[in-house]
Amino acid sequence: MKLYFSPLACSLAARITLYEVGASEVSLVEVDPKTKRTRPDGVDFTTIHPLALVPALELDDGGLLTENAAILQYLAERFGEGRLAPEDALGRARLQQWLGFIGTELHKALFVPLLDKQASKEARAYALAKEESRLGYVDRALAGREHLLDRFSVADAYLFAILNWTAVTPVSLRRYRALADYHARLRDRPSVARAFGEERTLYAKELARRGLSFIVGESGSRS
Amino acid sequence: MKLYFSPLACSLAARITLYEVGASEVSLVEVDPKTKRTRPDGVDFTTIHPLALVPALELDDGGLLTENAAILQYLAERFGEGRLAPEDALGRARLQQWLGFIGTELHKALFVPLLDKQASKEARAYALAKEESRLGYVDRALAGREHLLDRFSVADAYLFAILNWTAVTPVSLRRYRALADYHARLRDRPSVARAFGEERTLYAKELARRGLSFIVGESGSRS
C-alpha cells in the first residue's frame, strides 16, 4: 500500500495515523504540490489521481482511495484494531460527524481560500467571515475535553493537520483557548511530534527547491 | 427520532434515505432557513444546533447528530439492513470517499458560495473556477454506470440533492452528459420522486411566506 502525501498538507493526518498504528507496510510517496510530480521518481501524479489531491491511498488491489475522511477511517479499521476509531454505531457516527465538519466547514470552506495564493481578497474575506462561528463551535466542544471523542482518534489527527495552517493564514488560535491548548497538547503526542517534525523538514526542502526559505517556528501550510 | 430539514436543502438526501428504508419512526421537522425557527412550533433552531445547519438528527437518547455524511451513514446502518450502504470495509471506504467528495468539493467549495446571495461576485467566481474539474470528475466516474457504487446508496441521495441546485445557479449539467442522465434517472426513482415532490411543495410555501413565487419547473436550491 502507498500513501501519496505532500509535506504539511492535510495528508499529515494519515501519516500520524500510520505512526499511531505502526503500519510499516504502507510506504509514503511525496508529491510536490507545485509540479504535481512524485519525488524522487518524477511520476506525473495526475496520471494517478486526475484531481491531483492528497492524500490518496493506493490499495493492495491497485485501486486508489481518495478523500481524507475515507482514508483515515480505512487505515484505522485496517490497522488500528479499534484504537483510532470507535467500532459501535453511535461512536462511528460521532467520528464521521467530526470528520465531516473538519473536512467541509474548516478545511474546504475556511482554510482552502486562505491558503490559495490565487484567491482574490474577496474570496478570502468570504471564507474568513465564517471563522468565528466555525472555530468557536469546535472551541466550545473541546472545553474541558482532551480529544474530540473520548480518546484520541483519526478526527484529532485531521484537526491537528488543519490547525497547523493557522501559522500561515490570518486565523489566530489565540481567541480560542481550548482549541489552542488542544493543538499544543497534540503537538507533544509522540506520533504527532514525529510526523510533524518529518514533514516540517520535507516542507523546508520543498521551499528550498523553489528558492524560498523556511522560517523557523512556522508551522507551514498546504491546502 | 427527529430529522430537522429545510425544503430542498441537502437534508433532502436524508428524507430520500428514510423513504428508501421505510423508517416511519423518524419524524421530520421543518426549519425555516431565514428565520431559523421550526415550523409550525416556532422553536429557535439555534438552541438545538448552534450553527443552525440542516440536516440534524435528534437521536433516541436526546443527543444531536449533525453533518450529512454522518447522518446518512447512521440512517443507512440503523434502518437499511445493508441496502443503502456497503457493509464490507472497502465498500464502506468507497462510500465514504463519495460522501467526502460530494460534501467538500461539490457542496461546500462549489455550491455554497453560488447559492449564497450575500457572496460577492469574486467569491462566486472563485467557486465556479473549480466547476469543470470537479463536475467533470464525477461525470467521468458515472459514464456507463447507473450509480456511484454498484447500486443505489446514500451517496446517490446526497449527490441528487446537490445536483438540484444547478437549477438556480450558473452551473449547467448540459456539459456533463453522464451526470445529467444520472440526475434525470434518479428523479424517477420512487423514493426520490416522493421526497422531491414533497419538498418542492414545502419550498413553494416557504417562498410564498416571503412574498416570492415559485417558478414551475425550477428545482429550487438551498445551501
Image: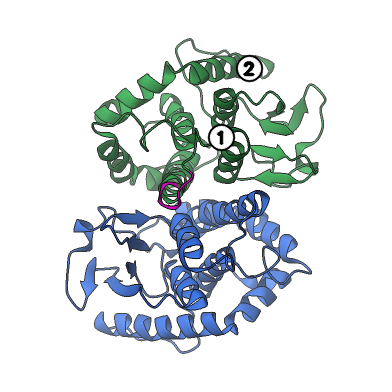
Chain colours: A blue, B green
Q: Position of residue B205 (x, y in %)?
A: 65, 14
Q: Which stretch is magenta?
A: B87-91
- The image shows residue A6, relative to residue B9, as above or below, that is below
Q: Residues within 10 Å of mark 2 (few under 14, many from 20)?
A: some
Amino acid on which the number 2 mark rests in the picture: Leu
The foreground one among A213 and B158 is B158
First along the sequence among labels 1 and 2: 1
- The image shows residue B2, relative to residue A205, as above or below, that is above
- Say if residue A54 shows up in the picture: no
- The image shows residue B171, relative to residue A107, as above or below, that is above
For mark 2, give the secondary structure.
Answer: helix
Q: Position of residue B93 (x, y in %)?
A: 43, 51
Q: Mark 1 to mark 2: distance in Å?
A: 30 Å
Residue depicted at x 66% and y 54%: A91
Q: Which residue is mark 2?
A: B202
Disc on res. B81: 1
Secondary structure of the magenta portion, mostly?
helix
Q: Are marks 1 and 2 on the same chain?
A: yes
The foreground one among A162 and B12 is B12
Q: Verify CB contact (< 8 Å) between mark 1 and mark 2.
A: no
Q: Residues within 10 Å of mark 1 (few under 14, many from 20)?
A: few
Amino acid on which the number 1 mark rests in the picture: Glu
For mark 1, give the secondary structure.
Answer: loop
Instruction: Indicate which label's residue lies in the foreground, 1 or 2.
Output: 1
